[in-house]
Image (cartoon, helix red, strand yellow):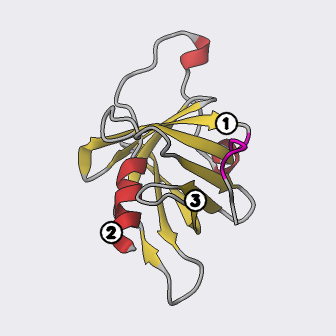
Amino acid sequence: MRKYIALLFAALALCSCDKPDNNQSDMLIEVTPTTLAGLWMLESYDNGKTLAEGTFVYIDFVRSDRSYTIYQNVGSMYTQTITGNYFIDIDSELGAVIRGNYGTDEYNYFDWSHRYIVQMQSDTMRWIAKDDPENISVYIRVDALPEGIVVE
């Protein structure tokens, strides 16, 4: 299970080292629990790879308690949910860095395998693993899970 979760968060690594242009819609916004809150869909991972057809990863960030829920079917034909907590740190050189843990009890709790530098626009997020600059993923904001995804 840890191998699948590590693979999942390897796919979740997001950030861009590109500078935004002067177009207002491309301006970066501050990464906070408020701006992060909501549902995001993994669009690409590992610096441009896309998920296989029929495969999905969604992550729902909750502002109030800094928790998240991942809905994914990577490595399974069924929807799996993974929960935990996230933390946003500000690095004076790198900007916003997100880290987190899986699980909500002492028996199923461990840290993410990476910390990620995050750059965010209103409807797009990029993460890059601090220790692996090739590990870049992109998420897009979505309103709801698609109807075909069954969550138990």
The single residue placed furthest to the bottom in the displayed view is 107
Q: Residue at x 34, y 30 (%)?
A: 17
Q: Residue at x 71, y 55 (%)?
A: 63
Say left or right for 138 vs 144.
left
Residue 145 is inside the magenta segment: yes
Pointer 1: residues within 10 angstroms few (<14), some, or many (20+)? some
Residue 65 appears at what percent x and percent y?
Answer: 71, 65
Q: Amino acid at mark 3?
A: Thr
Pointer 3: residues within 10 angstroms few (<14), some, or many (20+)? some
Q: Residue at x 40, y 56 (%)?
A: 9
Element type at mark 2: helix
Residue to which mark 3 is pinned:
79
Pointer 2: residues within 10 angstroms few (<14), some, or many (20+)? few
Residue to which mark 2 is pinned:
3
Element type at mark 3: loop
Task: Name which quarter of the figure residue 135 lies in.
Answer: top left
Residue to which mark 1 is pinned:
142
Q: Residue at x 70, y 66 (%)?
A: 152
Note whether residue 115 is visible.
no
